[in-house]
Amino acid sequence: MHGFLAPCRIINKKLTFANFFDFHSGPKSQIQIVSNLFEDPTEDQIKAQETLLSIAPFTPVSVTGKVFRRESTRRNKEEFESKATSPKILVKREFSSRHPSERTPGKTPTFIEIHLQSIQKLNSVTKDLVYTPDTVFPPEQRHLQLRTKYSLYSALRLRAKVASICRNHLERNDFLEVETPLLFKSTPEGAREFLVPTRSKENGGGMCYALPQSPQQYKQILMASGVARYFQLAKCFRDEDLRADRQPEFTQLDLEMSFATGEDVMSVIEELLNKIWFETLGIDLGGGFQRMTWWYAMKFYGSDKPDLRFPKTKINEITSILPHLVKNKDEHIEVICLHTDRHIDIEKIEKLRSSFEETHKGKGDDHFLSYVFGHPSTHLHPDLVAAKIDEEKMVEINREIWATPGCIILIKLRKGDLSGGSTKLGLLRAALLTAAQRENLIKTPERPEFVWIIDFPLFSPSSDSEPGQSGTAGLSSTHHPFTAPNPKDLAMLASAPAKVRGEHYDIVVNGVELGGGSRRIHDAELQKYVLESVLKVDPSRIHQFDHLLKVLDSGCPPHAGIALGFDRLVAILQGTDSVRDVIAFPKSAKGADLLVGSPSLVSDKDLETYHLKKRTNGQIG
């Protein structure tokens, strides 16, 4: 067998153990080398143990020996090590390379023993590399993180398995995998792009490719090319501010269907996700996923990606109970009630509430009130007293929201109509649920809750942070400018575009957006009208879509599609909050690959080749 050696554990002069990572079965499969010299050892066995003890951890080795499988119990291992004699063979079987996550549920885990006969070192390890089981390697040594941290290596295997499930399922449903170009052109789709300068001298230089934000335009072109059903695991690039669930380059499962509606796409995705969850986690998701309008999600959950595992923690309006806290008709007093486990001490609940309030409370729009129903000091809370919420008002509030002793109540003022992707109280709801789960005040349901969010506004107000298509109308596409309007709202496209609903749908699980799609505009005149008259995109920018408009005008069929965040999908299945944990070589929070040192400086000479110069103190040169 071939693999990497871990530090040796010397029991005595005649018995030594060492963990061995072969990476066919994963670092957690407990493969163990045993050097036992108790029963008339041969010279080769004595030499093998001497070699074993001389080899540094991390060294790649070739090991020869007899392989045995044992039940993986602490008692078995302790008995084996304490006797310090030749162990009895419990079971002798053919070695299995199956990953622990792929084994049949319910079967007793096993560990593998290699009774050492010979060992050969295949390379040396630098003396600067010190390793113990407690060593934590930095991102600059990502290769060692992957080699020693089971969860990272496990995630790579899971990622490969999910990719295989996706391909097999879609191919069986007549989807064709097509690779689209990574060197595209700059078009105002919404996100900031990465530009790739070229050496071309055409137009005086300055010619650039753009890395695709998504294969959106190419897959629509494929629909016009006669490809009925397309998919690919596509690399995408967006120059955005990074978070735990974002990377500048990422992978999405991209698909498109011609002569199809959003319902057709949603049906395909539901079947696929059911298959993924069953084959990786053994969970049957059951029938079709529930649907929820964007307005309902925002009104009662304060988010366009609501976590439905806690249905009692909905947002309720109590303006009629606290009318003195509003100044005009567009203000609303809203409340959420978190039902904690009834057996938890109320002082522990109050401690969480107080800590949560201190962490999240602000001034102005971020201000909120909170209390624990049933805590003896609630009516003395200075913020409640200042807001003139006395015990009588609390009784009304508690009755309205069906509160019980131990509930945590948050009260928040909301101004104006619903817009965007969340409200302030919606963000507080998500944060409170996370904190309560962390402190074990509520139980986390094991079953995932999927929901389709539909009837999004087709357009949203533009902002400096999200300029969208950089038009002058003050609006940008909520999804992208190729999303078709709801046919029922088509008449309002000219008179009241902000009220038009789009045929856009997001798939959400446990409060995480897994992906989004839409029925596309397949009529060139309508597409041009949206860009010119609704978004008021500059004519020079509209010119960048000429290729797409010509394709649509050539008899493009109706089509719809979706893109699932593949990194995020694997992260959810792996049970991690960060997509960095499921990507082999992720970028840091600053967008850097610390292992290889990218991005890196380029010499002035190389820049000149691409018609570029550095800026010095804001000046070129």
Image (cartoon, rainbow, N blue to C red):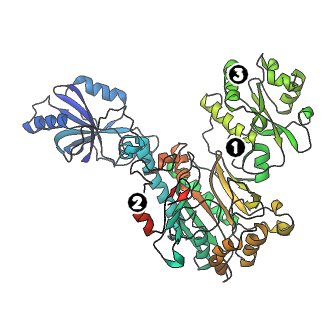
Residue 254: x percent and y percent?
57, 63
Say which residue label 1 marks: 308
Q: Is residue 475 visible?
A: yes
At 87% across and 66% down in the image, what residue appears? 495
At 62% across and 68% down in the image, what residue appears? 187
Q: Under tag 3, what secondary structure?
A: helix
Residue 95: x percent and y percent?
29, 47
Q: Is residue 130 above or below residue 448?
A: above
Say which residue label 3 marks: 350
Horizontal side of 355 relative to 377 (left or right) equals left
Residue 455: x percent and y percent?
76, 58
Q: CA distance from mark 1 to mark 3?
A: 25 Å
At 80% across and 46% down in the image, what residue appears? 299
Q: Under tag 1, what secondary structure?
A: loop
Q: CA distance from mark 1 to mark 2?
A: 53 Å
Say which residue label 2 marks: 603
Residue type marked 3: Glu
| Nearest the eye: 176 or 354 | 354
Residue 266: x percent and y percent?
66, 61
Q: Under tag 2, what secondary structure?
A: loop
Residue type marked 1: Leu
At 83% across and 28% down in the image, what residue appears? 398
| Nearest the eye: 111 or 600 | 600
Q: Nearer the viewer, mark 3 or mark 2?
A: 2
Residue type marked 2: Ser
Tell whether label 3 touches label 1 (CB within 8 Å). Answer: no
